[in-house]
């Protein structure tokens, strides 16, 4: 079963992909499907002995270009659609035990270039309206394959959170004539919540951080999407991202788990004046071995409660990022 059902009580779609229950779950390193294929061994997802970055279709996709017919018929109240879209896997190192924090700036830059190419390709599909590159890292966020990798989802509509962001940006634009993120960058750059300052991008704990150590990375200029980010700025984004991830590990003293996602303009050409390229990185760690879970207030009220002041988190992360060793 694979289909999308509309929730008329919240005006959003939910995707069902029950075949994903059968997907590979925490395989041993010897059985890792994302490791290179070793001579004399069974073929993995990557039929090569070495690689830098590879992209392939997810074998257990939530969205697909040939979705099956839905199991139930939609109604006026609850429309049901085939789950159209793309789900790709991006493996950015052939080292089973590496992390994005230690593959080096050059590799992070290659990953960003790969994202840019995939966003352009998937966004060219007329059935796609939004492309989201992301990485779920670590057992604390429920990762089922330990080999370092990210994913790219291409959705048939603009999903709820980016849609809300764009709507808020539209209201700000109507009121002020400006992009809200451009205003945020102007206000945050060089301020108490800045974590790493690049030439073309700024990393900071947003004043509204939903996770205690959330860091967002914003482009200084108004750039709607990753394929449009000039090469120099992309290199700067790679440097700053690598430093933030190394800073997390230095600060927490462990391999930090996190959710990392890229927000940009819809791929249908809309909202380019209010869509401003940025990365959001949300670790569940609260320090001292404690984790933040999405509990009652977050789940039922949508109201996040955070127990570290963004200014304090930023000061700690700024110091950790400054002393962290960032591999080239
Ligand atoms: Zn592996
Ligand atoms: Zn902007």
Image (cartoon, rainbow, N blue to C red):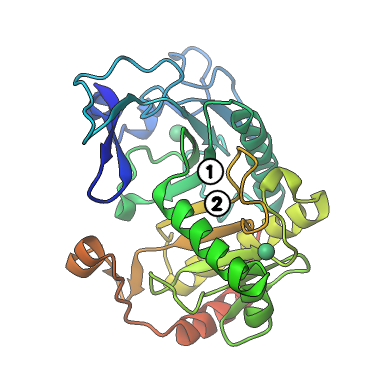
Q: CA distance from mark 1 to mark 2?
A: 6 Å
Q: Position of residue 32 (x, y in %)?
A: 40, 29
Residue 316 drawn above or below residue 48: below
State yes or no: Cβ of the residue under disc 2 lies below 8 Å from any atom of ligand 2.
Answer: no
Residue 206 drawn above or below residue 19: below
Q: What quarter of the picture does the N terminus occupy?
A: top left
Secondary structure, mark 2, is strand
State the residue position of label 1.
133
Q: Position of residue 110 (x, y in %)?
A: 69, 42
Q: What quarter of the picture does the C terminus occupy?
A: bottom right
Residue 271 falls left or right of residue 231:
left
Q: Position of residue 84 (x, y in %)?
A: 42, 25
Q: Position of residue 241 (x, y in %)?
A: 62, 60
Q: Is residue 324 visible?
A: no
Secondary structure, mark 1, is strand
* Crowd class of label 2 (few under 14; some 14 to 19; many from 20; radius 10 Å): many
**Disc 1 + disc 2, Cβ < 8 Å:** yes
Q: How many marks?
A: 2
Q: Is residue 33 visible?
A: yes
| Sequence-first disc among 1 and 2 | 1
Image quarter of residue 326:
bottom right
Front residue of this view, candidates 174 and 63? 174
Image quarter of residue 29:
top left
Image quarter of residue 189:
bottom right
Residue 162 falls left or right of residue 18:
right
Can you tell which mark lies on residue 226? none
Can you tell which mark lies on residue 262? 2
Front residue of this view, candidates 50 and 157? 157
- Picture residue at 80% right of the left edge, 51% below the top: 230
- Picture residue at 40% right of the left edge, 27% below the top: 63
């Amino acid at each position: 079963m694979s289909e999308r059902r509309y929730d008329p009580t919240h005006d959003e779609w939910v995707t069902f992909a029950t075949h994903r229950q059968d997907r590979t779950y925490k395989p041993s390193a010897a059985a890792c499907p994302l490791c290179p294929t070793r001579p004399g061994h069974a073929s993995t997802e990557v039929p090569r002995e070495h690689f830098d970055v590879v992209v392939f279709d997810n074998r257990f996709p939530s969205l697909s270009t040939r979705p099956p017919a839905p199991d139930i018929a939609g109604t006026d109240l609850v429309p049901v659609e085939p789950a159209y879209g793309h789900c790709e896997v991006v493996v950015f190192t052939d080292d089973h035990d590496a992390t994005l924090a230690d593959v080096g700036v050059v590799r992070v830059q290659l990953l960003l270039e790969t994202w840019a190419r995939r966003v352009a390709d998937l966004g060219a599909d007329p059935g796609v309206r939004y492309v989201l590159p992301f990485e779920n890292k670590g057992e604390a966020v429920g990762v089922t394959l330990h080999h370092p990798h990210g994913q790219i989802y291409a959705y048939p509509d603009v999903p709820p959170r980016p849609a809300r962001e764009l709507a808020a940006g539209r209201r700000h634009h109507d009121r002020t004539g400006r992009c809200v993120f451009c205003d945020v960058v102007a206000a945050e750059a060089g301020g108490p919540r800045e974590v790493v300052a690049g030439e073309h991008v700024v990393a900071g704990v947003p004043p509204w951080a939903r996770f205690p150590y959330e860091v967002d990375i914003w482009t200084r200029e108004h750039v709607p999407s990753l394929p449009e980010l000039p090469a120099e700025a992309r290199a700067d984004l790679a440097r700053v991202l690598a430093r933030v991830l190394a800073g997390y590990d230095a600060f927490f003293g462990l391999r930090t788990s996190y959710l990392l996602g890229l927000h940009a303009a819809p791929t249908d050409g809309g909202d380019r004046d209010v869509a401003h390229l940025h990365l959001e990185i949300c670790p569940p760690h609260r320090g001292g071995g404690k984790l933040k879970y999405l509990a009652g207030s977050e789940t039922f009220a949508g109201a996040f409660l955070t127990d570290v002041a963004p200014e304090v988190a930023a000061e700690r992360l700024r110091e950790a990022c400054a002393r962290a060793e960032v591999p080239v």
